[in-house]
Image: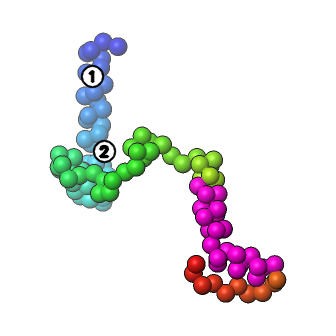
Amino acid sequence: MTSRTQAAWIIAATILVSTASAQAGPCTADIAQLESTVRSSATSRFAGPTGQQTIAAQLGRQPTPDSVRRAEAQAQAICMQTKDFERAYRAFVAKQKPVFEGN
């Protein structure tokens, strides 16, 4: 593609994007306000996430079914070490109502 063709595509896309909000109907004012807010916040050094992200989130990694299973198994193992779990298990086997003490 020549640079002249590329320039024509860029100009056409710019015109289409700029006229899209003009044809938005009753939401035009809201869209214009949103666009203004986004543009002004993009130049602010305070824009962006308010909390620190984990390394995995920064790298774009998403939880997989396997990683969720491992995390759940880990959490269950921790819970199974409590006295409340032991009381619940014994009550279940004896077909009684468990009494939890929070430990």
* Residue position for label 2: 20
Name the amino acid type tagged 1.
Ala
Residue at image coords 25%, 21%: 7
Q: Spatial distance from mark 2 to mark 1, Cα to Cα?
A: 18 Å
Query: Which amino acid lies under the numbered mark 2 shown in the image of this protein?
Result: Ala
Q: Is residue 91 magenta?
A: yes
Q: Nearer the viewer, residue 72 or 88?
A: 88
Decide whether the magenta segment is chiefly helix, strand or loop: helix
How is the structure coloured here?
rainbow
Residue 70 higher or lower than 77, as above or below = above
The image quarter containing residue 79 is bottom right
Q: Which residue is rendered at x = 70% and y = 80% of the image?
A: 87
Q: Is residue 2 above or below residue 80?
A: above
Q: Look at 63% across and 47% down and name the residue there.
A: 66
Q: Is residue 85 magenta?
A: yes
Horizontally, is 57 left or right of 30 in the view?
right
Is residue 32 visible to the viewer in this orientation of the structure? no
Which segment did they paint magenta? 71-93
Looking at this view, is 60 or 1 the one in front? 60
Residue drawn where x is 82% and y is 83% of the image: 94
Left or right for 66, reference 97: left
Q: Would residue 58 appear left or right of 50 to someone viewing this image?
A: right
Measuring from the top left, give residue 48's x and y in whole percent. 28, 51
Residue 1, image x, y percentages: 35, 13
Circle 1 residue = 8
Callout 1 secondary element = helix
